[in-house]
Image (cartoon, helix red, strand yellow):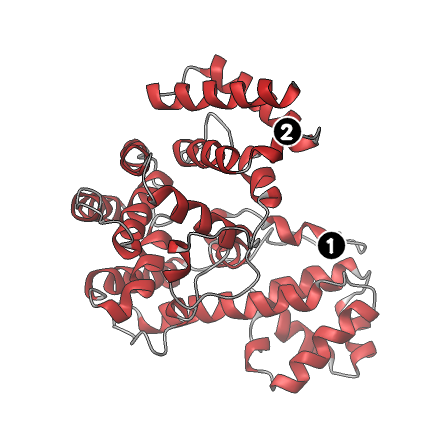
Amino acid sequence: MTGYVLKLARQSAGLTQERLAERLAVDGSTVQGWESGRRPLSAMPAGDFVRLSARLPRLGAHPSTGRHLRAAVEADLVLSTGIAAGDAWVDPDVHPLAASVHRKTLTNLITWPFTGHLPQELAVFTAKVPRRGPVAPGPTMGAAERTRFFDHLMTVAERGVHTDAALLRRQAVYLLGFDQRGQVAEWLRGEWASAGRRPIAEGDVTSLLEARSASVALASTGDSSHLHDFVTRTTGSRAELANLNYWAHWIGELHDDQTDDAFMAADDTRAWAGVRLFHHLVSRLDPTSPHLPLNLHTVHTLVASRPALLTERSAARDALSEALEVLTSADVLTRDGRDQVAGLHYALRLADR
């Protein structure tokens, strides 16, 4: 991951590998090794990595290059840990999946080899040099490595049943949604049968998120029915607040890193405005999205908690109005979904008064 991000940064600066090597006073094979992963940047001394991250923007790369490289190192650590361990257990104290609650930016990097989708954040890198010959459109992972990584996630999910492994297990279950093997989908259905039907006590964030991760992962495999069930169970409860807090962290409205899920139970949500989250969710009100039930429910809850999001004309507000019309005509909504769309239509009318 890190090597490919470096490649994007180099190309956006209009530099060939040879020219970058000259500017950095290193051998050409060194840059080739960094970009191919043969000489991982994550193995570079910390000071050298910081200096490289600072130098690239001065050579013409985007100012955010250092931030993206640091995130790529963390993504590589997650992937390499899983590949190295295979079906072996790794203790939560040293597992990178248990270090912090992941945000969208990091998760998109981790799953890039599986989705093939360029993370939106990396669109700032526009190539200024012609590419030579056929090149991969993104980082790749061999079939054997992919199997070892997902086998490790399964081991984590099955064995991480103690409290100290809650975050590790939850984030592993979420990532299992990107494993397209049939037996994994069956395991996720069993996980939902356990976590999704278990009563969730007020303030029990762990149980709530176990159910959420199972339903979201199943939706990623093409089975959205349980996501509908999850949304129905949380409607009208304090779980809606926890869901909003989770989304705010996921999209980056909460700036502090979180080492566990306890922050989601906070009653006071004034630490984040919701503007970025509103824009993000509205862009995902796609009738073909497997995660539409959760996205629509969260938009509805967000607007109910922050009606000021609709009081001023904005591109996101206009996009919401258009998205609601598409959803209404697409015939994909459940009864609850239709009620949520009607509620959002009403909120838009109120905002126009």
Instruction: Report helix, strand or loop for mark 1.
Output: loop
Q: Is residue 140 above or below residue 118?
A: below
Q: Nearer the viewer, residue 255 or 184?
A: 255
Q: Quadrant of the C terminus?
A: top right
Q: Could you tell me which residue is drawn at 72 percent across and 55 percent down?
A: 125
Of marks 1 and 2, which one's residue comes earlier in the chain?
Answer: 1
Q: Is residue 30 above or below residue 242?
A: below
Q: Position of residue 14 (x, y in %)?
A: 82, 60
- How far apart are the two marked residues, 1 and 2, measured between alpha carbons? 40 Å
Along the horizontal axis of the image, is 201 left or right of 309? left
Q: The residue under label 2 is which amino acid type?
A: Arg
Contact flag, marks 1 and 2 (Cβ < 8 Å): no
| Picture quadrant of residue 320 | top right
Instruction: Report helix, strand or loop for mark 2.
Output: helix
Q: Position of residue 116 (x, y in %)?
A: 52, 48
Q: How many marks?
A: 2
Q: Nearer the viewer, residue 257 or 19?
A: 257
Q: Position of residue 195 (x, y in %)?
A: 21, 48
Q: Quadrant of the N terminus?
A: bottom right
Q: Could you tell me which residue is drawn at 65 percent across and 54 percent down?
A: 122
Mark 1 = which residue?
Answer: 131
Q: Could you tell me which residue is drawn at 50 percent across and 55 percent down?
A: 249
Mark 2 = which residue?
Answer: 317
Q: Nearer the viewer, residue 309 or 67?
A: 309
